[in-house]
């Protein structure tokens, strides 16, 4: 019986090991050079004229629990309240000093999608402008949202949802997430439609999200094969002109068929992105190296300063205590590691080789710049 249990336990371990190996092999196959996945044309292009537009407005949030703007430091909040009450027929006497704690001035932003019709609802984001401590529990008062042409396209109002919490007592406070920005789901109603022309005349234009002549050629071939005619024509490395039906129903059906076509995009440009502020280094799969040698070593300078106190003797008449500084300077140089990188190395080999010589993330910044300057890095190096 004991042997049977041991045998069963070994089988379970072997089965789990088998699954782990299969998972690793699957991941390696995904990262293997030349691996490509077919994508829909709708994921690669946008249709010219079909776009969203941004809206902005100024409003007031009321109903805050004493966490609103300090009116002495934000006079525009008081002025907005006075103007709003005047429009409602309530005239305040001149010189009245309003001490409001439950009101906050905010900016309201939203994005109206293409083909949005009057009566449809969109989400809005509410952000504090003054020194309000929190917008939690507040209600946005009716706010017009305008476009770049200063025309009102939507009206926003509703209860604000803030994804944070905070509390304070006896000088101590705690806060989770941000309290001065909130969101109202379906908080604005579209009042005006934004014109969205779906192509001009008998043509529509597809705009590739990333400039690539090879991918443009593949899309043109796919559309022409699907329509059995020279329907699509490449304009440049980003735009494709497609002949489409003139009636709206047929044009919409035609676009839906084109968007559903699948192609395998061309391999992108080899690129290395380096963020000098955070030390992040991102390389795509097309990065390769020519034969080169990299030597890596660390040079550090250590300066240690400590105070030294000198006191006079016990019977000295005019002695004074003197504080001086004693500094020790030490220079350490680690042994350099020399690593030979073979030509044609792929991304996995590049990362493995740079890690093998002990390069940290910050060291990669200098190493990649040196490889690019030496002409060994077959990629575009971009520093952000």
Image: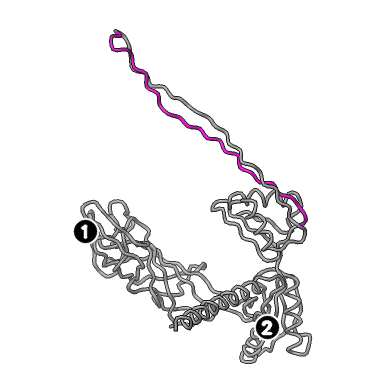
Q: Residue at x 70, y 84 (%)?
A: 202
Which is more foreground, mark 1 or mark 2? 2
Q: Is residue 290 left or right of residue 32?
A: right
Q: Nearer the viewer, residue 296 or 118?
A: 296
Residue drawn 70% across the image and 58% down it: 380
Which type of secondary structure does the marked residue at label 2 adopt?
Answer: strand
**Residue 323 sits in which quadrant?**
top left
Crowd rating for badge 2 (residues with CA inside 10 Å; few <14, some 14–19, many 20+): some
Residue underneath mark 2: 262
- The chosen color scheme is one colour
350 to the left or right of 114: right
Q: Nearer the viewer, residue 321 or 119?
A: 321
Q: Tell me if residue 306 is in the magenta stretch.
A: yes
Which residue bears the numbered disc 1? Answer: 93
Which quadrant of the figure has residue 288? bottom right
Q: Residue at x 52, y 68 (%)?
A: 149
Please say if 248 is above or below 134: below
Quarter occupied by the N terminus: bottom left
Q: Earlier in the sequence, mark 1 or mark 2?
A: 1
Percent x, y of residue 312: 33, 14
- 268 shown above or below 45: above
Indicate whether residue 370 is drawn in magenta: no
Question: Please, is residue 112 above or below residue 316 in the view?
Answer: below
Q: Is residue 129 left or right of residue 265?
A: left
Residue 4 place in picture, x, y as percent: 48, 83
- Whole-percent x, y for residue 151 in the image: 48, 71
Q: Secondary structure beneath disc 1?
A: loop
Q: Quadrant of the C terminus?
A: bottom right
Magenta range is: 290-316
């Amino acid at each position: 019986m004991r042997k049977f249990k041991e045998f069963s336990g070994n089988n379970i371990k072997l089965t789990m090991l088998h699954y782990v190996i299969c998972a690793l092999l699957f991941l390696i196959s995904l990262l293997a050079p030349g691996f490509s996945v077919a994508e829909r044309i709708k994921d690669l292009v946008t249709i010219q004229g079909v776009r969203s537009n941004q809206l902005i407005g100024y409003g007031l949030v009321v109903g805050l629990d004493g966490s609103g703007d300090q009116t002495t430091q934000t006079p525009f909040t008081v002025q907005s309240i006075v103007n709003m009450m005047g429009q409602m027929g309530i005239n305040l006497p001149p010189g009245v000093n309003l001490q409001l704690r439950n009101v906050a001035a905010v900016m309201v932003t939203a994005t109206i999608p293409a083909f949005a019709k009057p009566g449809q609802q969109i989400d809005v984001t509410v952000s504090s402008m003054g020194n309000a401590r929190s917008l939690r529990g507040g209600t946005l008062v009716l706010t017009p949202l305008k476009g770049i042409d200063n025309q009102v396209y939507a009206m926003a109002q509703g209860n604000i949802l803030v994804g944070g919490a905070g509390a304070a007592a006896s000088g101590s406070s705690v806060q989770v997430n941000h309290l001065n920005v909130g969101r109202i789901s379906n908080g604005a109603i579209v009042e005006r439609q934004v014109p969205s022309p779906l192509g001009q005349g008998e043509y529509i234009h597809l705009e590739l999200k990333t400039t690539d002549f090879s991918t443009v050629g593949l899309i043109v071939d796919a559309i022409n094969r699907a329509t059995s005619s020279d329907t699509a024509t490449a304009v440049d490395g980003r735009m494709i002109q497609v002949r489409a039906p003139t009636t709206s129903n047929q044009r919409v059906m035609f676009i839906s068929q084109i968007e559903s076509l699948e192609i395998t995009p061309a391999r992108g440009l080899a690129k290395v992105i380096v963020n000098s502020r955070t030390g992040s280094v991102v390389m795509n799969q097309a990065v390769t190296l020519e034969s080169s040698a990299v030597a890596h070593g660390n040079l550090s300078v250590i300066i240690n300063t400590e105070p030294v106190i000198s006191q006079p003797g016990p019977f000295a008449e005019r002695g004074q205590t003197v504080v001086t500084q004693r500094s020790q300077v030490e220079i350490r140089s680690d042994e350099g590691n020399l690593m030979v990188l073979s030509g044609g190395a792929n991304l996995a080999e590049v990362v493995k080789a740079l890690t093998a010589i002990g390069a940290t993330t910050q060291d990669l910044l200098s190493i990649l710049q040196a490889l690019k300057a030496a002409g060994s890095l077959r990629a575009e190096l971009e520093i952000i």
